[in-house]
Amino acid sequence: MRISVIGSGYVGIVTGATLAEAGFKITCLDILEEKISDIKRGISPIYEPGLERLIRNGLDSGNLNASTELEKHIANSDVVFVCVGTPSNEDGSIDLQYIESVSKTIGKSIKDSEEDIVVVVKSTVVPLTTEETVQKIILEESGRKRETVGIAMNPEFLREGSAVDDALNPDRIVLGCTDEKSKTALMKIYEGHTCPIMHCDPRTAEMIKYSSNSFLAAKISFVNELANMCDKWNMDFERVAEGMGMDSRISKQFLRAGVGFGGSCFPKDVKALRRAAKNDGLSSEMLDATLSVNEKQPEIVVNMAREMLGELKNKKIAVLGLAFKADTDDIRESRAFNIVEKLKNENAEVIGHDPQATETFAKETGITCTDDLEEALRGVDCVIIQTEWDEYKSIKPEFLCNLMKKPIVIDGRRTFDNGYFTDSDVEYVAIGLGN
Ligand code: UGA
């Protein structure tokens, strides 16, 4: 089976590299020369643990190839995965320009061929997009008969930071096929997996993706609201979460309170689902609340800084963790932006630290950023932890006391266990910890 993967962003490159590892012949396609030449040289276009090793394996075995010649490779493929981005428009709806242009390219590429082809949408798209946009454009552009083109929607559930493992060992596979051709091809591609495989129509597959992300985002906003109550009533929300998580219906996962969710998926997907619902006259109070709680969370750590330091003007504050979560260099929708903006509005002097994301964050915000922890901590009045990197978990209290002007730690991610700083001079406050 010859497989092309269009779009070498986070979904595309992980899909391509893991399918190559499983033994399929894969060509990763992208219009950006730089990404393609990186992949060809065994360099991952994104920071993702374990990914570069898979790319190199694929290149060595000859299973993985990369190219900017989209039409040529699409025309020679049995299966094409569409993995291009679906960014947000101003009003929260998704911008389908890349989906539309790739659908046109696919249509053009298969125009003069008689061979069967299967097109699988992996990009996150709102319900009906696969049928009403992708399928429609491909058939119009190619002039091909419907029965020669298989169309399916196969959402991805990868988490950044553990994407390789998630792709190799998924919890579930959802196949929204419109025809037997696409079903047969996808069952062959996923035959090595033992997890449950759900079959449905494309719109249901699209909705499963949005519903899953929105549910998890809502769960985070819900626990953040509860954690704020725990702060007020002086108790540790982590103990509450521990008790809640013992109920298998609730589950232990996604009960971590903090400065809120960021990343390229949750904020964008909740907004897109809300907009799609509104466009069709449906209310979305849960989605509204999910987003509004999330907007308020970064304010809490800034308020904590003000309470501990008084006026923030000219205070030197280090924001530790700029990536939206640990083990990624992705800063999209990172809560660090909201925190830094609020601190700057109060004329604090801000320095950012991150093991992976300093360059992009400094470029976007103009603040000084470093990947040297000592440099970040030297002489600061307090630190605010925004990302729970392992590097921070092993910070010793003496290290902070020696470097900082005042050893004050404001933990926006519950990075340290309750009691970690007892018997030290470090003043420690955290979201949902109580006094
Ligand atoms: C999320 C989903 O978890 C994946 O299943 C999905 O495939 C992916 O979006 C996507 O649509 O591509 P991701 O954005 O990589 O994955 O990251 P998560 O681990 O879900 O974390 C998202 C945000 O929620 C982070 O800012 C994280 O710090 C925050 N979070 C997570 C919490 O505040 N509390 C928690 O308990 C868990």
Image: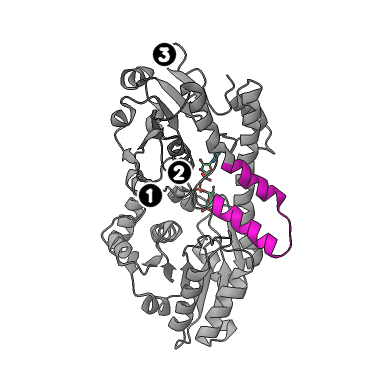
Q: Which residue is mark 3?
A: 425
Of residue 350 and residue 85, the one placed in the foreground of this image is 350
Q: Which residue is mark 1?
A: 364
Q: What residue is shown at x 43% (from left), y 70% (from top)?
A: 3
Q: Specify few, some or many for label 1: CA neighbours under 10 Å numbering under 14, 14-19, or 20 or more.
A: few
Q: Is residue 329 left or right of residue 157?
A: left
Residue 380's place in the image compared with 91, above or below, is above
Instruction: Examine the rendering and report whether any part of residue 208 can be seen.
Output: no
Q: What residue is shown at x 42% (from left), y 76% (from top)?
A: 74
Q: Which residue is mark 2?
A: 337
Image quarter of the C terminus: top right
Q: What residue is shown at x 63% (from left), y 41% (from top)?
A: 219
Q: What residue is shown at x 50% (from left), y 75% (from top)?
A: 103
Q: Percent from the top left, x then y, of residue 300?
A: 55, 32
Q: Percent from the top left, x then y, of residue 139?
A: 55, 82
Q: In this rendering, which labeled residue sits more in front, label 3 or label 2?
A: 2
